[in-house]
Structure formats: C-alpha cells, structure tokens
Image (cartoon, rainbow, N blue to C red):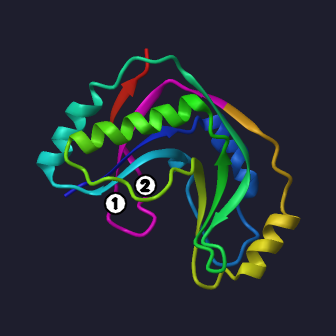
Amino acid sequence: MPRLFTGLAVPPEIAEALRAFRGGLPGARWIEPGDYHVTLRFLGDVEIPVAEDVLEALAEMRLRAALTVTLDGLGIFGGDRPRALYASVAPSPDLIDLQAEQERLVRRAGVEPERRKFTPHVTLARLRRDASPEAVAMYLSQGPAFASLTFTADRVTLFSAKESTGGGPYLAEAEFPFV
C-alpha cells in the first residue's frame, strides 16, 4: 500500500539556498534538501486500485501556465508543541487554484476529503518532543535572516514516501507537466 502525495518539487538552487537554515535547533530532524517540496495534496496510505485511479485522474489535470512560487519566511506548525519548521509559501491565486484542482481530482478518484486548511509550505525539519517552544522561538529570532526565494513550477509530481515518520526519501512516481 503506497503512501502518496502530490506536490511541486523545489529546484536544486532553491534547496541549496534553504540549506542556510539547517542546524542550530535542538530536537530538529532535518529534511534532506533533495526531498524539499510544496505539498499540494497528501493522500496517505492508499490501496493499489485507488493509486491507479489517482494516476488516471491526475492525467486529466487541465493545462495551465507555469506558476511562480515565492518562499517568504519561516514558521512552525504546532504552537506550544512545535512539530515542524517550514519555509512559508506566499499563497497566490494560481497556487490556490492548482491545489483546489488537486483536491477535486483525487476526491473523484476515491480519496477522502482533506480536512485541514491548505497552508503552502516547504518542510525544513520535523521537531521531536525535546524541541521546546522557547528553543524554537530563539531559533526563529536569532537565526539567519530569510530573504524571499522564488522559483517557477511547471509540473505537479506524484510522490511516494516510505512508511516512517517524515517519510523521506521521496520518490517521484509520475509527473504532470502544465503546458
């Protein structure tokens, strides 16, 4: 049973720039730069017939122009119990439209509706229990300054992940070019 998600791969030059934020945060398990991506729709563990239906549905994605993706800062998920450090993605109308289309397509293929609000981001680290809110706040306030990073995305990738916390390394199972 594969664990799948759709996303936008982060180009190597942007991944290299994000390396500057690795380290200096106790309790962080850093994601490998080659695994950086913007998740559009997490599908989870799906049966093979559903995975095949997802592939067929994604092949029907409408044609669209390449879109600009801008990383504009750092943030955390989890609040008082931080669980992930991420680079935030400025939500553009084109990105929101793409994510909504992904949701419609995978639901039509039999995947349960997503219950979480779409928050576009690139996960940089998963945080263990010993990553205290104080340590995270100190990291965010005293770490390197975040200068916006922009790249062009011209395809959606269907990724598979290992069955483990954090999932990487990720494997590109299929790509769906925009134009």
Q: Secondary structure at mark 2?
A: loop
User: Where is mark 1, residue-wise?
Assistant: 162
Residue 51 coordinates in the image, percent (x, y): 20, 45
Marks 2 and 1 close (CB-CB < 8 Å): yes
Quarter location, residue 163: bottom left
Residue 38, numbered circle: none
* Three-letter residue code for mark 1: Lys
* Three-letter residue code for mark 2: Pro
Nearest to N terminus: mark 2 or mark 1 = 1
Q: Is residue 123 above or below residue 157?
A: below
User: Where is mark 2, residue-wise?
Assistant: 169
Q: Where is the C terminus found, in terms of image quarters?
A: top left
Quarter location, residue 81: bottom right
Residue 138 coordinates in the image, percent (x, y): 83, 73
Is any atom of residue 50 visible in this view? yes
Residue 31 coordinates in the image, percent (x, y): 56, 59
Residue 154 coordinates in the image, percent (x, y): 50, 24
Q: Magenta region: which residues?
A: 151-172
Residue drawn at (78%, 40%) of the image: 148
Which of these two is toward me, 134 or 166?
Answer: 134
Near mark 2 (Cα within 10 A), the count class, few <14, some 14-19 or many ≥20, is some
Q: CA distance from mark 2 to mark 1?
A: 7 Å
Residue 170 magenta: yes
Residue drawn at (51%, 17%) of the image: 65
**In this rendering, position of residue 49 left or right of residue 41:** left
Q: Where is the N terminus found, in terms of image quarters?
A: bottom left
